[in-house]
Each structure stands twice: as structure tokens, then as C-alpha cells.
Image (cartoon, rainbow, N blue to C red):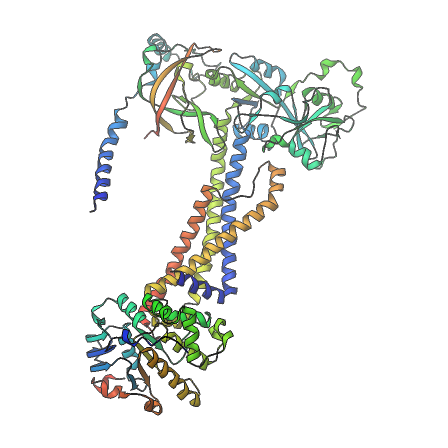
């Protein structure tokens, strides 16, 4: 058997240019195939890590998936805000344990600013049940204090005491700056591997303060002197959304109903677990389409393999006759061709996995910064091993074609090539 | 046929014969059995009064009492799974089993005694939340605090299978 | 030179005995009808057969890659016609070595690996080679040297880089490694220069004698007949009708 492998390897090596090209074809297709699966899997995991311990998310009337996306994952923008009064009315319903209000709409150099309270730090969980921790400093206390996520600190090179300017709106390049109200970084969160790392956290009052002289999206007039402002004016009048933790889980559907039918303004309450399944359902079609396309690319790669093996088959009749002369059986000739196919496929798969690691190493930073999806290079997961096994299996099936042809020819030719 | 093949065939035949008996034997528990008699009668009286004309919110029906006889009963209930807590691999850690899904807004949401809290021993791979499932196991009544209800239903699940 | 005695004692007395052989393609008329063809141990037989006389068919029958319509082909003590195809392949690997006119070698394998192909498919031959020379490498080296290829560095070069003359010697070494009972050579010198032919033939003959292998040498070149114990003509041997021999 090892004799066959040596002969197969030597045979491939003698055709190494063609063999290498075939290898690369298979490798690139595998890289794509496994890459799609890996991004899909890790994106899902990233999302799933982010949602923890929240029973309901409430915001202005919108599609449940959209509400979850902008309020938890910081993707997309809110359609509308909800009034402070409505928020308090719901927060005081029996069964509600805690709430965390959030106010979105500003950004800092592309990172979303989250106006919130100390409840955020206390109640928000990630990866199921892990609480937030401050790597450095404290949660905000003074009006213009800010706490930043680990990603923000790392990418922008910020440290405690840093002065930052917030921008109005969420666009990355933004001329609308709140440069009359600089903030000071007083705390840096420990990394969580979720979009929490990409937030800049300030108090709700601070959000009100920086918009005091803003009308219809632009700054007008002079910046008011805060010492002369009645503190009541800094009381938030509207928020974007709030998270709810229940004391009484049995009330969950009642509270959801109350929110969805709230008379004063149109609101939506979603259960994160349910909304996530809706998200997967929406994405499911796209995911399956991508996998099918990637599988087709693999098929194309394997067809290239088939072509290479078939093309040289007639040249190798003499080779096979020689092997028969020294006592090889037709099944040994079959085995030789199959071994070549499997060697090429396995090497291609291995190379593909390596290429994928390289691609991930290069691109993961961008994915993390842009979408909060953390993908790390690493050994293939169980699901990915199955895919890889499937590719090698498909290669074996493809290899059957030249192998069987060679088998039949060998039986017919024997030691001498008959024309 | 070798001896081991024979043994496997016999074992398979026994299991196949027994399988329908095992799950078929589980007694079906109806949702209404979880509701006290007098509340059911009140519901029946109200039945004719459901108004689809659209003014105002539905009448709230706060059915919070449990039926003590149900405690410890073994059987299966069919309902929809609402995940309350999921882990990183999209497995369900705990869920509510509810009698209906996406009811029209004219009908109140399921009251506490029509909610069954289920916490599987092993994380349950994500299900299709739009399909009904059988949850088989022992029904329990648990006292709770901080609630509009004094006690709630739970099932210690033995098997969770799709409803055919 | 080898210090071991040749292992002639291990060879059967009659390495090849063909009796009442009949062969034809499909439903075509009989191509070969051979009442008897016998080789004794260590015998060197010249078989004259011009192209088209059915010699490659006969060689394939002896090798077991073709099955006759009827008749007996005994390789030593084994009746080859009673064996299924894969066992005949095994038999060929164990008992026979072949040298063809050209294209004997796998071009992408080294000289060494080509020679060793001769015992790749037979444990018995591998064992014999190791027993005789100590290792497969030593056996290969010795044979190549005996056949006139003493150049050491050639050993690891790909066979494609060798001249035709060198390739034939490598082929002969492959045929002889592991002491087969029977070496069958089909026009092995036809591609060589005229002056090289006798020399090659002599070395092959000597090595056959040393290892106890019988040699069946098929060729159209009657000039070489003299070096053999016996000369046969396929056209006399083959009793099938002349019209059948296309």
C-alpha cells in the first residue's frame, strides 16, 4: 500500500506544475467554502454572546428584528424615539425588576455613543451570564464623564483622562461635532468580544446637555453656560429603547402585550430569544444561498481535479502496462489513480485551511471593527471538519471516474498496449 | 448471519416494537386541565362576548390559580416553545411552553396558569419556534414570590419532540 | 561479486509448461494452437517470432494477463489457468520477470525505485533478494553492476534521464531481482545498437545462470540465436491455420 502512495506521489511530482495548479484550485474553493461556514457560525455565536439576561427589549414601533439589531448590536438606526413618560409607565408595571434606558444617535469617530445610566453597568450581561467589568477607572459620574469599550480604547489608543469630542449622528466621517462639549474618559471596560466593546458610554443627562442648542440637527447660537441652566432641563425627555429584566417571569407576555398596545405612543416589545430566531430565519435564505454557491465553487475545483486526472490517462497507458508486467493487478492500478486523487484533494484541503487562517488573520480586524463580529483563526470546528470530510469524500467520488477507466483499460491492455 | 448480527437484529426488533408503546403511553394533558373549574366556566360564559369590533384592549383575564391535583402528574403537553434563555451555540437553556402562538390581539395573552416553565437538564438544540412540540415529563407546581400568581406550573422534561 | 551461492535449489524443475493451448479473440477463429512449450530450470530458449505472429499474445497468456480458450499453462507447480485473474497477477509477480523492447521503466521513478518494482508485488521475491544480498538496495546495486551499469550516481536519477541502453539494463535488473523462476524478454535488444546487443545478451544470460532463472527470449533477430540452448520458431510451434494469423 505504501508502495502505491510512493508511486502516486512520484507520479504527481513529475507533473508538479499541473498538480500544483489543481491543488490551488481545490485549496481556494475549500477556503471559500469553509470560510463562509466559519463566518456564518462565528457571526451567530457573536450575536448569541451579546444577548444575555435581558427578558424584553422595548423601543418605538418597529420590526422586532430591527429593534434588536439597533438596540443591542448597534447595527442600523432607530426609526423613532420613545418618550420618558412612556418609559416610566412601563418600568413601573408589576413584575418589572430592573430597566436600563439607552439613548442612541451620536458617535465618536465611528463608534456609537450610548447614553445610559449606571444600571447599564450593573445589569447588562454577555455570554449568558457574565457581568461587565471595568479594566480601568470607574463608571461615569460627572456630567461629561465617558466610559469607553475595550475596542475603542485599543484602536484609538485612548487612556484614562483622554479628552474626546462626540459627533452628532452615526456616520463615520462627520462634520457635525459637539466640540463645545468635550468629554473625559474616566473608565475603560474589559473586553467582552461583543459590540459592547465598541461603545462610548455617557449619561442620559449628558446627551441632553450636548443637544441643548441644537435644532433640527444643527447647532445654533452660542453654547449655553451650564452653570446657568436649570438642572431640570437636563432631564431626559426621550430615549431610544430600554432593556427590561423581570422579577416575575410569568408576567412576560402581559407586559409585552401592554407595551405593544400602549395607547400613548406606538411601541414594540421583543423577547430577544424569539427575535434572534426571527433573525436567523431571515438570514437563513441568504446563508443557504451562500453555502450553495460555495459548494458549487468546490465542485468546480473538483472538476478541475477530474480534468487533470483524465487528461493524462491516455498518456499513462504505458505506465499501467509496466505495472501489470511487474505483477500489479487492475485493482492496484485503480488504487493508484484513487490515491492520486485523494492525495491532491487532501493536500488541497489542507492548503485551503491554511489559506483560510491567513485570510482570517488579515481580515478579522476589519470585521471586528466594522461589525463587532469576532472571528479568530483556529483549528476547524466539528461542523467544519464535516465539511472538509465531505470535500475529500466528493473528491473520492470524482476520483472514481479516472480510476475505473484506468481499471478497465488495464484489464483490456494487460502488459501490452493494444491499439 | 453471525451471532452478533443476530443479536443486533433482535434488539432492534424489540426496540422498534417498544417505541410506540413508550411514547404512546404518555398520557396527553390538556391545557384546560391546568385551569381551575370555576375559571373555565367563567371563560365559557365570556366566550360569546369576544368583541372583534376593535374598540379598546381585550378584557384582561388574570387566571392565576393552579390546580393542585396536577402536581406530580406524568404526561405530555403540546404547545409552542418560547425561549427565555439561550447559550452561545443557540441551545435553549429554559423556555415557556405556551398553548398558542401569535394569537390575535383581541385575545389576552396566556395567563400564568396557562404557562409552563421548562428547564431541560441538557441544553436543548434550538427548535422551530413556529411549530408545536410535545413536552413529556412530570408536571410540577412551584410556589413563587414577587408575582401576581402564588404558584406556577413547570415540567421536568423527559422528552421533547415535534408535534406531528 | 556476490559472496552467496546461487539459489538454484529453490527453482522448480519445469518453470514453464504450456500444453494444448488454444486462444482466439472473442469469436474470431483460433489464433494460437500450441501443443507444447516447455522450459527447464535455467534453460535459455530463443523463440523466433516476427511481428504479427502472435508472440505478444503468447507472452500475455504465459504472463496470465490473458486467459486461453482451452489448454494448460503450468508455472512451476501451479496450474495458472485454474486461477482467478488476480491470483495469476500474483503468480506473475512471484515467478516471472519481464523485459520489453522499450519503455520498460516508469520515467518519474528513480533507477533504484524502478529496479525495486520487481519485488514490490511479491513478498517472496523481496525476501529472496534480502536473503541473497542483505538488503533490497544491495540487491539492486549488485544486479545493475552485473548488467554493466556501475555508475553509482545513476542510482537515484529519474529513469527518464537514462539512455536507451542504460534503461534496458535497468529493466533487466528489475526482471531479475528476487530470483524469479522465469525471465521473459520480448525484443529487448532491438532498440540497442548492433554492437551493444551481444554484450547485453551475455550479461543477462550470465545473471540468469547465476540466479537459476530460465530465460525465454523472443526476437526476430536470428543473429542472436547462437547464444541459446534451444531455438524455436513460433510459426512452427503454433499449429493454428495460417489465415488466422493476420
Q: Residue A234 location in percent, x, y?
A: 71, 17
Q: Residue B73 location in percent, x, y?
A: 31, 17
Quadrant in the rendering for residue B133: top left
Is residue A289 shown left or right of residue A404? Answer: right
Is residue A253 shown left or right of residue A180? Answer: left
Residue in the foreground of this view, choosing between A205 and B54:
A205
Quadrant in the rendering for residue A216: top right
Is residue A66 shown left or right of residue B74? Answer: right
| Residue A409, visible in the rendered structure | no
| Residue A50, visible in the rendered structure | yes
C182 is higher (above) or lower (below) than B23? below
Q: Residue furthest top?
A: B38
Quarter holding the C terminus of chain A? bottom left
Q: Residue C30 location in percent, x, y?
A: 21, 80
Q: Residue B99 location in percent, x, y?
A: 38, 21
A251 is higher (above) or lower (below) than A5? above
Residue in the foreground of this view, choosing between C234 and C2:
C2
Is residue A81 shown left or right of residue A37? Answer: right
C15 is higher (above) or lower (below) than A18? below
Quadrant in the rendering for residue C233: bottom left
Amino acid at each position: 500500500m505504501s508502495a502505491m502512495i510512493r508511486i502516486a506521489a512520484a507520479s504527481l511530482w513529475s507533473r508538479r506544475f499541473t498538480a500544483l495548479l489543481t491543488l490551488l484550485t481545490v485549496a481556494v474553493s475549500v477556503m471559500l467554502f469553509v470560510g463562509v461556514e466559519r463566518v456564518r457560525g462565528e457571526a451567530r455565536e457573536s450575536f448569541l454572546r451579546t444577548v444575555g439576561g435581558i427578558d424584553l427589549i422595548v423601543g418605538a414601533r418597529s420590526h422586532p428584528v430591527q429593534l434588536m439589531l439597533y438596540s443591542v448590536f448597534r447595527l442600523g438606526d432607530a426609526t423613532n424615539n420613545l418618550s420618558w413618560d412612556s418609559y416610566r409607565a412601563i418600568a413601573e408595571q408589576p413584575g418589572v425588576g430592573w430597566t436600563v434606558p439607552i439613548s442612541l444617535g451620536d458617535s465618536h469617530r465611528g463608534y456609537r455613543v450610548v447614553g445610559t445610566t449606571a444600571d447599564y453597568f450593573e445589569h447588562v450581561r454577555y455570554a449568558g451570564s457574565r457581568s461587565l467589568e471595568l479594566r480601568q477607572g470607574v463608571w461615569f459620574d460627572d456630567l461629561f464623564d465617558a466610559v469607553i469599550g475595550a475596542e475603542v480604547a485599543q484602536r484609538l489608543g485612548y487612556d484614562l483622562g483622554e479628552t474626546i469630542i462626540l459627533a452628532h449622528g452615526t456616520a463615520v466621517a462627520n462634520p457635525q461635532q459637539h466640540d463645545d462639549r468635550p468629554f473625559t474618559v474616566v473608565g475603560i471596560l474589559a473586553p467582552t468580544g461583543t459590540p459592547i466593546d465598541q461603545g462610548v458610554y455617557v449619561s442620559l443627562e449628558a446627551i441632553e446637555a450636548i443637544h441643548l442648542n441644537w435644532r433640527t440637527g444643527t447647532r445654533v447660537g452660542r453654547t449655553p453656560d451650564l452653570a446657568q441652566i436649570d438642572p431640570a432641563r437636563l432631564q431626559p425627555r426621550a430615549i431610544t429603547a430600554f432593556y427590561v429584566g423581570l422579577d416575575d417571569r410569568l408576567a412576560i407576555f402581559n407586559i409585552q402585550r401592554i407595551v405593544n398596545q400602549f395607547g400613548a405612543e406606538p411601541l414594540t416589545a421583543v423577547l430577544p430569544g424569539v427575535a434572534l430566531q426571527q433573525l436567523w430565519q431571515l438570514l437563513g435564505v441568504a446563508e443557504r444561498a451562500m453555502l450553495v454557491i460555495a459548494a458549487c465553487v468546490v465542485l468546480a475545483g473538483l472538476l478541475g481535479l477530474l480534468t487533470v486526472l483524465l487528461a493524462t490517462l491516455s498518456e499513462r497507458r504505458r505506465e499501467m502496462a509496466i505495472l501489470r508486467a511487474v505483477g500489479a493487478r487492475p485493482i492496484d492500478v485503480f488504487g493508484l489513480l484513487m490515491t492520486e486523487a485523494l492525495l491532491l484533494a487532501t493536500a488541497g484541503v489542507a492548503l485551503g485551511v491554511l489559506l483560510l487562517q491567513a485570510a482570517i488573520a488579515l481580515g478579522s480586524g476589519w470585521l471586528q471593527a466594522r461589525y463587532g463580529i469576532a472571528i479568530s483563526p483556529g483549528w476547524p470546528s466539528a461542523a467544519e471538519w464535516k465539511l472538509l470530510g465531505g470535500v475529500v469524500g466528493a473528491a473520492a467520488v470524482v476520483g472514481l471516474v479516472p480510476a475505473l477507466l484506468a481499471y478497465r483499460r488495464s484489464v483490456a491492455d494487460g502488459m501490452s498496449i493494444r491499439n | 448471519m453471525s451471532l452478533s448480527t443476530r443479536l443486533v437484529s433482535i434488539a432492534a426488533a424489540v426496540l422498534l416494537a417498544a417505541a410506540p408503546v413508550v411514547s404512546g403511553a404518555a398520557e396527553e394533558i390538556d391545557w384546560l386541565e391546568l385551569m381551575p373549574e370555576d375559571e373555565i366556566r367563567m371563560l365559557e360564559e365570556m366566550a360569546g362576548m369576544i368583541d372583534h369590533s376593535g374598540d379598546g384592549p381585550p378584557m384582561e383575564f388574570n387566571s392565576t390559580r393552579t390546580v393542585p391535583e396536577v402536581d406530580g402528574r406524568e404526561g405530555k403537553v403540546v404547545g409552542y416553545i418560547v425561549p427565555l434563555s439561550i447559550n452561545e451555540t443557540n441551545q435553549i437553556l429554559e423556555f415557556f411552553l405556551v398553548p398558542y402562538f401569535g394569537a390575535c390581539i383581541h385575545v389576552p395573552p396566556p395567563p400564568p396558569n396557562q404557562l409552563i416553565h421548562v428547564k431541560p437538564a441538557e441544553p436543548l438544540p434550538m427548535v422551530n419556534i413556529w411549530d408545536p412540540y410535545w413536552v413529556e415529563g412530570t408536571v410540577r407546581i412551584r410556589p413563587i414570590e414577587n408575582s401576581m400568581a402564588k404558584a406556577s406550573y413547570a415540567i421536568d422534561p423527559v422528552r421533547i419532540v415535534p408535534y406531528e | 561479486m556476490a559472496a552467496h551461492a546461487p539459489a538454484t535449489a529453490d527453482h522448480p524443475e519445469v518453470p514453464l509448461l504450456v500444453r494444448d493451448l488454444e486462444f482466439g479473440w472473442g469469436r474470431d477463429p483460433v489464433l494460437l494452437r500450441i501443443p507444447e512449450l516447455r522450459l527447464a530450470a535455467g534453460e535459455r530458449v530463443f523463440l523466433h517470432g516476427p511481428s504479427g505472429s502472435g508472440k505478444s499474445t503468447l507472452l500475455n497468456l504465459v504472463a496470465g494477463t490473458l486467459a486461453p480458450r482451452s489448454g494448460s499453462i503450468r508455472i512451476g507447480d501451479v496450474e495458472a489457468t485454474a486461477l482467478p485473474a488476480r491470483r495469476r497477477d500474483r503468480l506473475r509477480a512471484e515467478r516471472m520477470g519481464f523485459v520489453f523492447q522499450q519503455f520498460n521503466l516508469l520515467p518519474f521513478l528513480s533507477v533504484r525505485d524502478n529496479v525495486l518494482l520487481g519485488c514490490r508485488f511479491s513478498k517472496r521475491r523481496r525476501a529472496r533478494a534480502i536473503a541473497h544480498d542483505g538488503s533490497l538496495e544491495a540487491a539492486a546495486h549488485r544486479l545493475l553492476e552485473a548488467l554493466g551499469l556501475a555508475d553509482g550516481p545513476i542510482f537515484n536519477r529519474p529513469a527518464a534521464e537514462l539512455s536507451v541502453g542504460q534503461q534496458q539494463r535497468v529493466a533487466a535488473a528489475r526482471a531479475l531481482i528476487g530470483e524469479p523462476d522465469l525471465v521473459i524478454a520480448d525484443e529487448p535488444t532491438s532498440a540497442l545498437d548492433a554492437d551493444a546487443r551481444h554484450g547485453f545478451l551475455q550479461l543477462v544470460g550470465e545473471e540468469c545462470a547465476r540466479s537459476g532463472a530460465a530465460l525465454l527470449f523472443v526476437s526476430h533477430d536470428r543473429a542472436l540465436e547462437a547464444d541459446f540452448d534451444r531455438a524455436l520458431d513460433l510459426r512452427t510451434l503454433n499449429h493454428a491455420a495460417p489465415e488466422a494469423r493476420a
